[in-house]
Amino acid sequence: MEKEIARKVRRRLLPFLFLLYIVAFLDRINIGFAALTMNRELGITGGQFGLLAGVFFLGYCLFEVPSNLLLHRVGARVWIARILLSWGVVAALSGFARSVTHLYALRFLLGVAEAGFFPGIILYLTYWFSQREQARTLALFLTGAPVTTILGAPLSGWILDHVHGLGMSSWRWLLILEGLPAIVCGVLAYFLLPNRPEEARFLSAEEKQLLTERLRGEEERKRAQHPVSALQALGNGRVWHLAATYLALMTGFYSMSFWMPQTVKSLSWRYSNTTVGLLVMIPHLVGLVAMLTVSWSSDRRMERKLHTALPVLAGAVGLLLLGSAPSSAILCVLLLALVLAGIYSFLGPFWSLPSEFLSGFSAASGIAFINSVGNLGGVAGPWAIGAVSQTRYGVYGGYALVSVALFAGAALVLLPRK
């Protein structure tokens, strides 16, 4: 009966949460596609673009923890709706920027507006799913990242090639059109998301009681074994270890997210923006399959450490080989596929680790802290590649440098725990 309840909750909640994550991730990374024409129009250098990609995460990280604590206090329905509405407005306004300075400010504000969304959803899922169900459930939600690029890359390329009007460049329309869905989804979230199982109209009274008792029992065991308050979670050694690990891993993740379109475009001047979008889509398809497979295996074996570390090692090797500037488009796409298979696969098992010892407000603050520190990798990785791209080593030298972060992240995961 518990498995049937989990399936019912999955069918009811995950499709909408999945849609929200697609919208969030698209607004976060579409600057990478906009750069194909935006950089030339505004005179943005490689170093400036690296900073432009990363400044989002400065605003994002500053407000992660307070945002997640507020979500736990006021309820997911109201707070997630607020996040969606505010970031949709800022994302659409980015299309009206007139200089790189305007874009710096708007990207920072976009991070402030979106702060708390991802850790908020991770926390929200712990309200509904037991520990045994979490890696698989998280992976189904997190598939929004590769699916965003699978759908968004061809769409973004097509908009850049075909959408013009009202005297505005195509990259402006790209940012405006891809920001509007967040506003619509914010309104829907207010009406569609129940805060807790007790409010779920799609569950019977018996199902609500069984699910609530099961989750309450897990939470009480965690509190007995790991009595950690919200404030103590911020100083907890395991939380800091996971934050440092996530920082290393996300350095590689966001380096690929922001720089891949320009990397593929550089393979041949004959590629249209639509062709670039289609080529970028292929590695993400491979990453999607690998992500679901690894997360299913992690839940089946109830093992998290190796299922996190081994894919990261594979991605690090792929990124290091990519740093040798592959001579053909086929080899480049294959290496990109290896990197993304490794990077996407670690997400489900990794995000099952905090809920092994955190619950309630400690989970709210701990998960947000891990995510906020980790997302500073979105500053470090793109900026490092942008800086190296202006030297004789080029963007591929930047990839080789970022591979060090992935190797370090895998080593941190494998460290023995006291």
Image: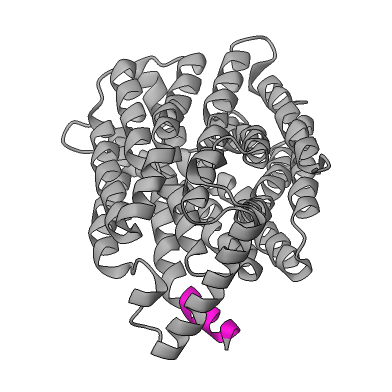
Q: Is residue 29 left or right of residue 252?
A: left
Residue 47 in picture, x, y percent from top left: 51, 15
Q: Does 232 sit above or below residue 3?
A: above
The quadrant of the picture occupied by the C terminus is top right
Q: Does 80 sit above or below residue 113?
A: below
Residue 408 in picture, x, y percent from top left: 76, 31
Residue 357 in picture, x, y percent from top left: 63, 54
For the record, the magenta segment spans: 2-10
The quadrant of the picture occupied by the N terminus is bottom right
Q: Would you say residue 373 sits in the magenta stretch?
A: no
Q: Is residue 40 left or right of residue 233?
A: left
Determine the residue positioned at 49% across, 69% down. 128
Q: Is residue 327 visible?
A: no
Q: Is residue 269 left or right of residue 49?
A: right
Relative depth, front residue between 16 and 357: 357
Determine the residue positioned at 45% across, 16% down. 48
Label tally: 0
The quadrant where residue 289 appears? bottom right
Determine the residue positioned at 76% across, 42% down. 413
The quadrant where residue 290 appears? bottom right
